Image: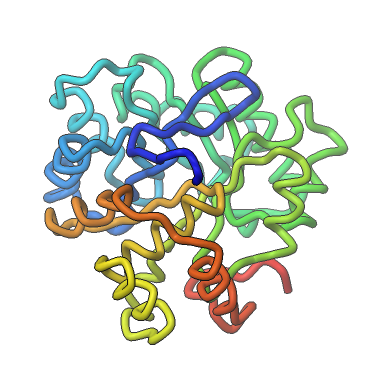
Amino acid sequence: MAQKRSINDTILVAASLQAPQLGFGVYKSPSSVCEASCQTALSTGYRRIDTAQFYDNEKEVGAAVRKSGLDRDAVWITTKILVPGATAEESYGRCLESIERLGAGGYVDEFLIHSPGVGGVEKRRETWKVLERLFKEGKARSIGVSNFGVKHLEELRDEAVVWPPHVNQIELHPWLQQRKTVAFCEKHGIVIEAYCPIARNSRADDKAVASVAAKHNVTPNQVLVRWSLQRGWVPLPKSDTPERIKANADVYGFELDEGDMAVVDGLDEGSAGALVMALDG
């Protein structure tokens, strides 16, 4: 019998940090409701919140953490830079603005390059050096990337001081399993974070997932989050509906057996299953 899992489970990041495995995403969470959604998540037991400059809700995330009554070091906060500045110094300034908006004790737990698609390889390397600076200065406890395929990860290696990146956050769900990128990350000890882990409810009627859900008397979305956890990833389900926020974390009262995992593993459609970004070509 596998060791019993709980919402307090952590995963090793940057060789020495214990980060919560289950996360709460706030993509497209409007500023008018984001703070309340984060408060619901924190009261439910989530201890990881994933935001970004592009989401335009860093300030609300920071406010929710401050008002939660939790110590700052009890909540893992991730943000991302999407559009680098014209110079490295300008990019650095944009990152400091994120930290200030979050009001997070002068640091964030994780700072990522949001996408390889803004600028070419030299701009990616320049932006990575900015994150390395934040890491060295203690303004980011860990650094990583998002939406990076194997090519992009290897491109950083030549000039990087910190390599491999601590984290790669990519689209991951049963219909897009990004096997080549996942294998590379696992080989090099890069933590894999899964956005769209419930495929934005686009596969809610999938019969295979529904059968597994019925077997355990849970919802299909709960199966998807649990599958991601059991794969060793960091799922980042998102919602602004309190009931769904709570349900997406209620995944510790059942366990997927080998047969269940095989059923879900067998749903991969490769790039055809992508909602946002397929990386394996």
Is residue 30 among the parts visible in the rendering? no
Residue 171 as seen in the image, left or right of residue 144? left
As rendered, which of 254 and 238 lies closer to the eye? 254
Image point 40% across, 64% down: which residue? 224
Image vertical order of residue 53 relative to residue 278, above or below: above
Residue 162 occupies quadrant = top right
Residue 184 as seen in the image, left or right of residue 190? right
Image vertical order of residue 211 relative to residue 81, above or below: below
Residue 219: percent from the left, percent from the top?
A: 26, 69
Residue 14: percent from the left, percent from the top?
A: 62, 26
Image vertical order of residue 270 relative to residue 190, above or below: below
Number of callouts: 0
In the rendered view of the protein, which quadrant contains the C terminus?
bottom right
Image point 57% across, 22% down: which residue? 134
Image vertical order of residue 72 relative to residue 62, above or below: above
Image point 38% across, 86% down: which residue? 207
Image point 74% across, 55% down: which residue? 183
